[in-house]
Amino acid sequence: MPIITCPNCGTKNRIDDRAQSLQPVCGKCGQKLPLASSSASSKPLIVTDATFPTAVLKSDKPVLLDCWAPWCGPCRMIAPILDQLAAESAGRYVVAKLNTDENPRTSAQYRIDAIPTMLLFNNGQLVDRIVGMQPKQALQARLERLTTGASV
């Protein structure tokens, strides 16, 4: 049975596989839960120097871009959190990953000198920069402010 974290209150909800065709709701706060699916949006989007302009700058949704490298311990520690955020996005935002070792042009353009660094883009503009490990709730709060139009 999949477990879906409520984007509203953070409660973990076990969802019966037989009920996937129904709209699940949080057992604690009653908010509708994002449906777990096998769609591409349920995993972070891999971005390269070549795809960055289209995937991030021309996105019609806010984008959280994780700048990381395979050798970076904190990057590997935050990866499951980003996977969860991508799975819970429900189409409101995009979670993307940029390997800084393989994509030096974008890394240099945005002055990525420490990793993990997460860049938040909205309407093609860099609106926030988060450096280092962050709890899931902090990242969720910043994404929610972007999706609701509040200032970051």
Image (cartoon, rainbow, N blue to C red):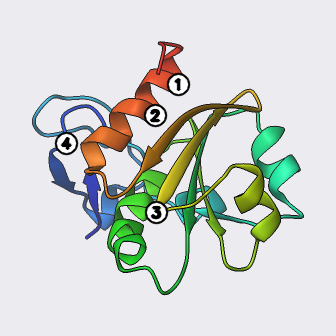
Question: In the rendered image, which residue does mark 4 sit on?
Answer: 10
Q: Are marks 2 and 1 in contact (CB under 8 Å)?
A: yes
Question: In the rendered image, which residue does mark 2 sit on?
Answer: 143
**Of callouts 1 and 4, the N-terminal one:** 4
Query: Residue 56 at x, y = what percent?
Result: 75, 46
| Amino acid type shown at disc 1 | Thr
Q: Give the image quarter of residue 137.
A: top left
Query: Residue 50 at x, y = what percent?
Result: 89, 64
Cα gap from disc 2 to disc 3, whole angstroms: 17 Å
**Of callouts 2 and 4, the N-terminal one:** 4
The residue mark sitting in front, 3 or 1, is 3
Cα gap from disc 2 to disc 4, whole angstroms: 14 Å
* Mark 3 surroundings: few (<14), some (14-19) or many (≥20) residues within 10 A: many
- Residue 116 - label: 3
Q: Quadrant of the N terminus?
A: bottom left
* Mark 2 surroundings: few (<14), some (14-19) or many (≥20) residues within 10 A: many
Q: Are marks 2 and 3 in contact (CB under 8 Å)?
A: no
| Amino acid type shown at disc 2 | Leu
- Residue 147 - label: 1
Q: Is residue 118 above or below residue 123?
A: below
The residue mark sitting in front, 2 or 4, is 2
**Of callouts 2 and 3, the N-terminal one:** 3
**Of callouts 3 and 4, the N-terminal one:** 4
Q: Residue sitting at 48 percent across and 14 percent down? A: 151
Q: Single out the residue that lies furthest toward the bottom.
A: 71
